Image: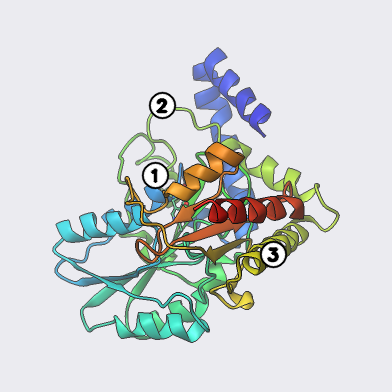
Amino acid sequence: MIEKQKHYMDLLEYEPVDFSIRKWFPLYHANKEALAEFIGAKPHDIYLVPNATVGVNHVLHNTKDTNKTWLTTNHAYGACQHALQRIGGAKGNEIVKVTVPFPLQSEDDILDAIESGITPDTTLALIDYISSGSAIIFPIKKIIERLHARGVKVLVDAAHAPGMVDLNVDALDADYLVANCHKWMCCPKGSAFVYVNPRHQAEFHPVLYSFFNDWDVDNARHWSNQFIWEGTRDYSAYLCIKDTIEYMATLVPGGWPEIMARNRALAIQGAKLIADKLGVSLPVPESMLGSIVTIPLWDDKVPTKCFHYYSDLKNKLYDTYQIEVPCMLFPKAPTQHMRVSAQLYNSLAQYEYLAECLLEIRRGM
Ligand SMILES: Cc1ncc(COP(=O)(O)O)c(C=O)c1O
């Protein structure tokens, strides 16, 4: 896919005008259509963005509420929590962050925590589909239904969902959904999308105005076309989405369903192996796990340097054992967790090696 991406970068550099005005648009649409089919959405209801962070910012800037309450959980991704605070704060909105217990026993722990934070002033909730640090698959459909029943719009941060779970965007009926193609779909970095439910599209505008705002106005594509061009830059990652979806599906006989099932099975097997060696329990019921699993570790008294995905142990694993694995001080320092993942290129032996390294580090403390 990187070769493919370089091919598009070359085309742009060799003949910038020809590529940008003739070749780019059909390629953009073909890739967006393939993505829409993969995620269960209609092509005109999504547009492409470089990453989930940008997508969440777009949605929050588009939300008109002022002097209301916006809800999220303590499991939301740090960058998105910042966006909620800053953009919501600038609009005079109060941000309520409910605490979802961790470890947790069942989906009800999440549903009850979210329900407890709703007030008559709550207009919007930012909820993860699959949380980053805690690696929980949230019961997102039930959450959306409950929030809608209380009149609250839902922005789903589904950054990890495409390619990890069988995502069906239309069936969720979220108000807004943002997700990455450069995580579990394995597309090049800089490929993600924003979905806006048709009931909000008339009120949803580009954050960056550019060309094409007045283009195609009579066409069903007009709404989503307003977002396609953020000035001249390298859009090559978008153009590899379709090929990546097709290529990945050829890697195992059962295509995408098999990729997702294999990754999940290996992540859980590897996590259980490590947890057994460390003598700890997984903090989340297996039914709520996907291809990332968080494991409790010993406390780390080292202060966070910049953000909570950064610990002394993480550096030691990298510097001494060449293992890159997120160790985070979650829910808050000094409590420390580690998160393992599985993709087709991983094997059980790697989790065994990680477990041995952890034991060695522990013995040396
Ligand atoms: C839940 C969640 N949301 C948002 C993001 C941000 O993704 P990006 O850095 O691609 O914007 C991440 C990244 O890991 C994430 O895990």
Q: Return the residue at label 1.
A: 226
Tag in front: 1 or 3: 3
Q: What colour scheme governs how the chains and residues are painted in the rendered image of this protein?
A: rainbow
Image location of residue 273, percent across then percent down: 69, 64
- Residue sitting nearer the eye, 319 or 138: 319
* Marker disc for residue 207: none
Residue type at numbered disc 1: Gln
Image location of residue 55, percent across then percent down: 40, 51
In the drawing, does residue 145 fall left or right of residue 165? Answer: left
Is any part of residue 221 visible from this angle?
no
Q: Return the residue at label 3.
A: 273
Residue type at numbered disc 3: Leu
* Marker disc for residue 232: 2
Dot 2: element: loop
Identify whether 358 is placed above or below 153: above
**Residue located farthest toward the right when viewing the structure as drawn:** 253
Residue density around tag 1, few if under 14, some if 14–19, many if 20 or more, within 10 Å? many
Instruction: Tell me the CA gap for discs 1 and 3.
Output: 49 Å
